[in-house]
Image (cartoon, grey):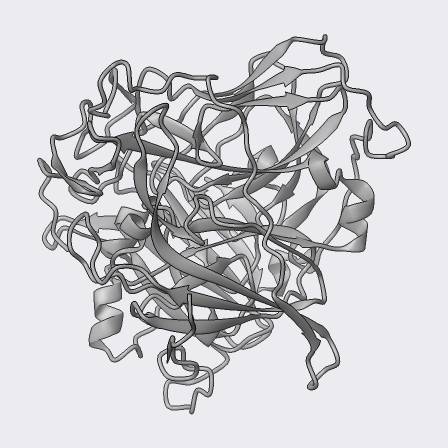
Amino acid sequence: MSISRRQVLLIGGLGVLGAGAAMLPTGSVEAKSASRLSDKEMPRPFQSAFVQAPFLAPYATGIDPADGLPVNYYRVTEMAATANILPRLTTPILGYNGIFPGPTISLDQGTKAVLRVRNQLPAQHALDGHALSTSTHLHGSASLPQYDGYASDITHPGFFKDYHYPNFQPARTLWYHDHGVHFTALNAYSGLAAQYHMHDPLERQLLPQGRYDVALTVNDVMFASNGALGYDDNTHSGLWGDVILVNGKPWPVMKVQKRVYRFRILNASISRSLRPTLSTGDPLVVVGTDGGLVPTAQSVSSYRHGGAERYEVLIDFRKYKTGQRIELRNLSNKNNVDYDYTNKIMAFDVTDEPVDTTDPTWNRIPTTLAGSETMSLKASQSVKTRSFRVKRNDATNLWTINEDSWQDVIASGYKKVAADPALNSVEIWEIENKSGGWFHPVHIHLVDFQIISRNGQAPMLHERGPKDVVYVGEGETVRLLMKFTPQQGVYMMHCHNLPHEDHDMMVQFRVGLKESDLDVNDPMTAAKAEWDDEED
């Protein structure tokens, strides 16, 4: 897809370029707004009530005869719909079951899942006319390659695919989103994203549950004058909207009791990074990262949160007064484009609703949480160090990893790999970003990794837990330690600034196989989508 710098694509039509956009970020850029809404239609902070996405119940349960483990069967339908984001105007979206964010899946470690994803989308995207084929990635799951949302393993409108998820990993916040080749940014931005929670006994014992375990899916958007979503990726460098949504509502307000809450914060923005902080100056206590619980809780006044990263934080509302408002603000980071209200995320209003003090998590701020195989790895175990450089190729106008791109993977018949680690081997991967002007949240599929250094120094406090996305900032070099287990086959590595991924900062690596080996889990052939003849 080719989109000129001065063209803005709108879901539902074409429009004018958002103010303040820049092809090449060179620092923190500020402007009044990007949307083309009239002043009376433009949402303002703290006017909307907070809502959570509904939980998706399985339509059936069973037992896997191969291993005797329980299986939950779920079904979601990708469809065009409208959302009530703005005060009066409706917004066309693409959503799982027609909502954004899509329904949350919640289950226990050891319960497998089969998720049927039905593509009932229109044949073409209303925004630019690309074919609305999709590939669903459960981000954070060690799935087999054919169920991992391999970008070129697409499901066309009118077809479905059953995705099998093993769910053997420790408790964590995952999310599922579209990963369709070259159109992930547009499809995810249009609404194809949702959270997925996996619990285990230790996590249930230590951290708040139920209504006090709160999912926050945060993203930024811009609007056309008719309420449709605007899209401008600034020659594929990134999209920065002027409206911050939390669970599909602009800057919402949540009522809270005087107790400890757990928040699962997902940055689902396609480009924007966040730096959350509380207006009171009180700490956010990080208890979980992408891959689950951290070994030791970390209290931070703010933290850097890139696209696709998940951080679980505790906020203690016990000392606040009834009626007090606490804002979750955004300090932003270098090379975002910021607007009038992008320095705010949401607010909490403290109530006098009675607190159940028989719940041991109501006042618990744990210090020691859980170790993991990932966080127990030692650099001395590494059998190989590999180096990767993320950059923009000015000659081709493509984003690359070591000069390679997904176009190269396609041209090779899906054989070209950037790395070929052995199954169960431990390696160090070093990622360097010296291209200037951009930060890159880099996602490595299949594995959890440990960040062992950033520019030769210790990792930041908030990222001292198992990760699957690493924020590689301007001029930074990070070193990651990981074990390539438990699956073999081909998996993707890419930038989660999704316009970068689509153009074309994505490569693949092959675990435990040689190029000449028969791959029974080949994602292009092992589990194809089927025609959907199910009645709506």
At horizontal 18% and vertical 38% (from top left) the residue drawn is: 234
Q: Quadrant of residue 221?
A: top left
- Residue 309 appears in the picture as rendered: yes
Q: Image check: 393 left or right of 199?
A: left
At horizontal 71% and vertical 9% (from top left) the residue drawn is: 322
* Image x and y of residue 35, in percent: 23, 25
At horizontal 77% and vertical 43% (from top left) the residue drawn is: 369
Q: Image check: 2 left or right of 206?
A: left
Q: Is residue 69 above or below residue 453?
A: below
For the residue pair 156 and 272, the one nearer the viewer reads as 156
Q: Is residue 157 above or below residue 170?
A: below
Q: Quadrant of residue 324?
A: top right
* Image x and y of residue 356, in percent: 85, 28
At horizontal 63% and vertical 46% (from top left) the residue drawn is: 465
Looking at the image, how many numbered discs can be counted on the residues? Answer: 0
Quadrant of the frame with the C terminus:
bottom left
